[in-house]
Structure formats: C-alpha cells, structure tokens
Amino acid sequence: MAEDDVRAAEAAQNELNALVLFKHDMAAYQRMYAFLSQIFDYGNTAIEKRFIFYKRLLPLLAFGREREGIDLSKVILTHHALKHQGNRALSLNYGEYPKLQPLGELGSGSVQEKEKAHLYEIIARVNDLFEGDITESDRLIYVNNVIKGKLLESAILVQQAVNNSKEQFANSPDLSDELMNAIMDALAAHSTMSKQALDSERVREGLKETLLGPGRLYEALRERSDLHP
C-alpha cells in the first residue's frame, strides 16, 4: 500500500513538473518575442497570435504548489515615496563594463534533464554491445530511434503493453520476434550494427534490456494505444 502511495506521489509530481515546465517555456517564449520583435519583423502572424494567446493564458495557469516564494503577480502599486539619501560619485572611467547575460536554452528544466538522463543511460548500455568504428550518436539513433521506432509500429506490442505488466511484457515471445523483425527492417540502413545484432543473441538480449529500461519501450507503446483501437 505504501509503495502504491509512493508511485502515485511520484506520478503526480512528474505531471506537475511537466505542467510547470510548460508554463515556464511559454513565459520564455513571451519574453523572447517581446524582445526580438523590436529588432525585426517576423513576417508571420501565427507567431504573434501565439504570443498573444500565451500572454492571456499565463495568468490563468495557477498550479499552486510550484511557487517557492510569495506570489506578487497580482499586487497593484497604489503609491510610493521618494527619499533623498545624499549624492554619490559615479566613476565611468575605469573598470569593466557590466555584461548582459546571454539567453538560456528555452525548454531547459527538470523534465528535459530527465530525458537527457535516459539518453545517457541508453548510450552507456549499448556502448558494450557493438564493436567497430561506430559513434555514440549512431548507437543512440539505432536503438532509440530506428529499432524503437519500428517496434512502436507493432500493433501486437501496443496491445500487449496495454494489457500486461512490464514484467509480463518483457517475457513475451512476441517481443523477441518483433525485435528480430525490426532489426531486419533496419538492416539496409544500418547494416553494421544490424549484422552484429542478427548474429549475436547477447546483443539482442542487450538491446531488449535497454529498450525496456532507459529506452522506455513499454511506456511508449502504452502511450500509443489510442492509435491502435
């Protein structure tokens, strides 16, 4: 029961993190548009419409718990007072000029970092599976895009992922058969790795473990269940 509560709490926190990150990305888009629109004309009304939509939508997105401090966004300044605190000499003849901070990467945040962690784990697992002059990028694309992409097209695997636990799904003979089919389909484009995968049971088992682990094949198939009624 406690484990179920922990899993439910983690799922709720992940969903909240995604919503908060989405809100932050909209705010970043709004700030960047407001700045860059003063420099040049986008020539695209869709970009301006999206800016206006985000501007109206952002004040309505109050998730509540993501705020770490006091929310002052709706505070209205009614009056203020000025006090003379003396004169100060400002020297402009020496020292370095202050530099503007560059724009950060839009969309960066905890959700994106989690995705990067999955990719790094995939690379770490497949590095020992394949031999020869193969780059990490080739390995990552082959496993996470080519093979996983082929498996996601399988209506059989989608149905099994929806109706079974991850452990039951991992032991399905159809998974091994569909993995072999995916490897054969990818042989022409990725002949070096595909040949090693076809000739080695160890490589195929390593691929299956990687896809079920950081590759999140099971989870991705469940998410696509609505595409295969």
Image: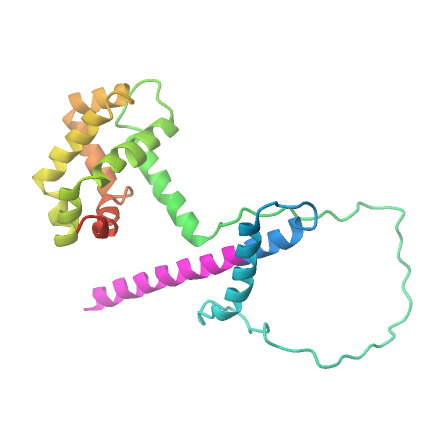
Residue in front for this viewpoint, 172 or 44: 44
Q: Looking at the picture, how far across and down is residue 36, in whole percent? A: 65, 48
Q: Position of residue 43 (x, y in %)?
A: 61, 45
Q: Check the image and report above or below for 65 versus 205.
A: below
**Residue 145, located in which quarter of the rendered image?**
top left
Q: Is residue 152 visible in this depiction of the protein? A: yes
Q: In the rendered image, which quarter is residue 136 located in?
A: top left
| Residue at screen point 23% across, 41% down | 152
Compared with 131, 71 (above or below) is: below
Q: Quadrant of the N terminus?
A: bottom left
The residue range painted magenta reads 1-26
Determine if residue 28 is in view.
Answer: no
**136 up-or-down from 81: above or below:** above
Q: Residue at x 66, y 52 (%)?
A: 35
Q: Nearer the viewer, residue 119 or 91?
A: 119
Q: Which percent across, then down, holds residue 211? A: 24, 39
Q: Is residue 59 left or right of residue 113?
A: right
Q: Magenta segment: does it hold 116?
A: no
